[in-house]
Image: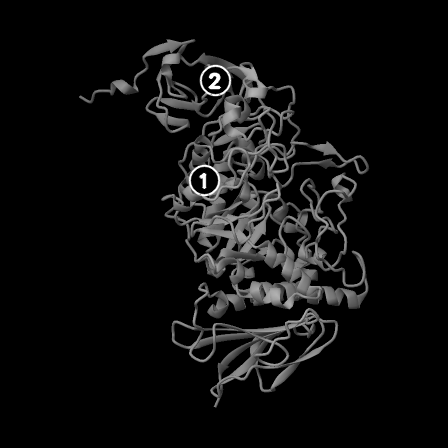
Amino acid sequence: MELERIDNQPVETIDGLRVRPGKPLPFGVSTVPGGLNFSVYTSAGTACKLVLLSRSEKKIIKEIRIPDHYRIGDVYSIVVFDLDYEDIEYGYKIEGPYDPEQGYRFDGSNILMDPYARTTSGREEWGEEPNWEIQYQHRSRISFDDFDWEGDSPLELKDEDLVIYEMHVRSFTQSESSNVKFKGTYAGIVEKIPYLKELGINAVELMPVFEFDEFENSRIHPDTGERLYNYWGYSTVAFFAPKAGFASTGKYGMQVDEFKQLIKELHRAGIEVILDVVFNHTAEGNEHGPSISFKGLDNKIYYMLTPEGYYYNFSGTGNTLNCNNPIVRNLVLDCLRYWASEYHIDGFRFDLASILGRDPWGAPLSNPPLLESLAFDPILSSCKLIAEAWDAGGLYQVGTFPAFGRWSEWNGKYRDTARRFLKGDEGQVGELAQRIQGSPDLYQWNGRSQATSINFITCHDGFTLTDLVSYNQKHNEANGEFNRDGGDDNHSWNCGAEGWTDNPDILSLRTKQAMNAVALLMTSRGTPMLLMGDEFGRSQHGNNNAYCIDSPISWVDWTLLNSNRTLFEFTKAVIQFRHQHPCLRVNRFDHAGSEVLPSCSFHGTTPWSVDWSSESRQLGWLMSSQQENNKPDTVYIAANSAHYATWFELPRLPEIFEWNICFNTGNQAEPYLKEPNVFKEAGILVGERSMVIFTASPRET
């Protein structure tokens, strides 16, 4: 006869519910035989109530004051038996002092969300107006990790082999032109996986998918009457919960399974999943913001506070998480371990990551505990860690971010240099040479490699590629802030007309400039990142900060795939070209090159001689490596950003090799060749604002 364990049995009844002391770890809710274990941390709270709500009846059904003797250290925990897991929502009421000057903001009447909640309710359907009369807007729910992964695991692709595609879940398929069944959802992306495969990318970087409130700071545009949202989602409500409003099944509480299905299908297609995560601040804002979770649980622990009790604002959004406090550090680690283990996430990009290296008073740390912990965590050891190495407080760490041998960086210097060279600014050739070879001036001195540099020319934050070549100035009137928001240092050029035009010469130049940008990105060492829709001319009509726009301005217009087919085919071809040529993906600064040529060399209009003067706008670069089959792989690129054509003499190859021309953006009738053509001339006239790409192959006898 099997005996029941005594530690699985209730020891008392409170308000009609059978309970027993809980386990303090793990935090959040976990299952035990016959019940649920609730655990929550508060160091200064004096009492804790567990609030249970009925999802179906939309009301509070029980409030259980957790007995003081159930508390261990600073953790209240309780096991409650016989609950309807599917119908239960829950939260906490924490009593304690209310003394903002001392950092305490306890309110025993407020229901707080569990910071470890794995799903939440309250925003199940995107854009559906919530009932503002409900006190508890974001309700914690129970989630069970019972998804069938069918043997899936993270792909662990090499950093240098990645071609990253940044996308917003809703924007990617929300347009009617996407022709998917489940528009604007995780399931909608699944329907577009064949397209992503055809394009040739092998990693998607998803803008925030942790639960956020699209109605945070929502407002009506005073002129258009359009509702403006917290569209991008860089304001986290629940760090362990996927955004329900991005799931076609969110109203049924199935967002976890739908998101996991997306990840499984992307992995099946050989595509990694990188999440854009926001640990620098939360949705609770400053002293005037709501108390959703952290403020009411332990405000003084979770946030950086001034001596007067106000919130430091290094994020530019009202508050700053105190990430190097051990409690907050553990929360971040627990969160990322959860996503890596339970969702099979391949990597994380950290928004305003420099904040993660500040001490509780905002000073930069030389050896930040959180960044070090993430770098050496055993569960995260195979995950990509990508830093946006700056913050809104003025800390800029591109090239000096505390990497611990693990972190990559969004290379903002690559973006700015590439843009300025492409538009023909003077004094860019020397800087461009550094960026093309993987930015050794930033990364070689500290023992890092080329793939440390995430190379990009456009991203969600700023102009799309088409807008970069179509506008001199931002046009953010749709944001309702009188065009004051968004950056002004765009390094853009409209090619002769601001915005829309039917001038065929201007349109042709814009297409060529977009091709130049893609060619430059894909022939640079480092890890390239492409913004969704750039491959076929997506435009936001000059808006360089569409953070609040849920309209065709932000949505991908898939009709452009046909109207700008040449740009798409060019982009697809140059991505494939990158995959085919390991010399473009070298990831060692001490790489010797091939048997016949150095790893990376620079050339001007004359081989081996570069004009480094500020007036120069011509640069050639030759990359070479020895392949696994012991054959050399060599690529040469000639780039002319001047407004006039320039003759480039080609570097001479050993007699047994010859050049083949593969791409020529100056030939708009045929900018790429399906099969490389042997090029027997000693040089080539590179057209104005054009790039030509060659490969070396054994000479035919």
Residue 243 or residue 307, whichever sits in front: 307
Q: Indicate whether 429 appears above or below 694.
A: above
For this orientation, the residue located farthest to the left is 1
Mark 2, residues whose alpha carbon is within 10 Å: few (<14), some, or many (≥20)? many
Quarter of image, res 232: top right
What residue sits 44% from the left and 23% below the top? 40
Q: Which amino acid, by three-letter code, is at mark 2?
A: Gly
Residue 453 x, y percent position in the rendering:
52, 57
For this orientation, the residue located farthest to the bottom is 701
Report whether residue 293 is seen.
no
Residue 313 x, y percent position in the rendering:
61, 34
Residue 590 or residue 681, whichever sits in front: 590
Q: Earlier in the sequence, mark 2 or mark 1?
A: 2
Residue 271 x, y percent position in the rendering:
48, 54
- Quarter of the image with the N terminus in it: top left
Mark 2 element type: loop
Q: Which residue is mark 2?
A: 45
Q: Indicate whether 123 appears above or below 621.
A: above
Q: Which residue is mark 1?
A: 370
In this rendering, position of residue 128 left or right of residue 439: right
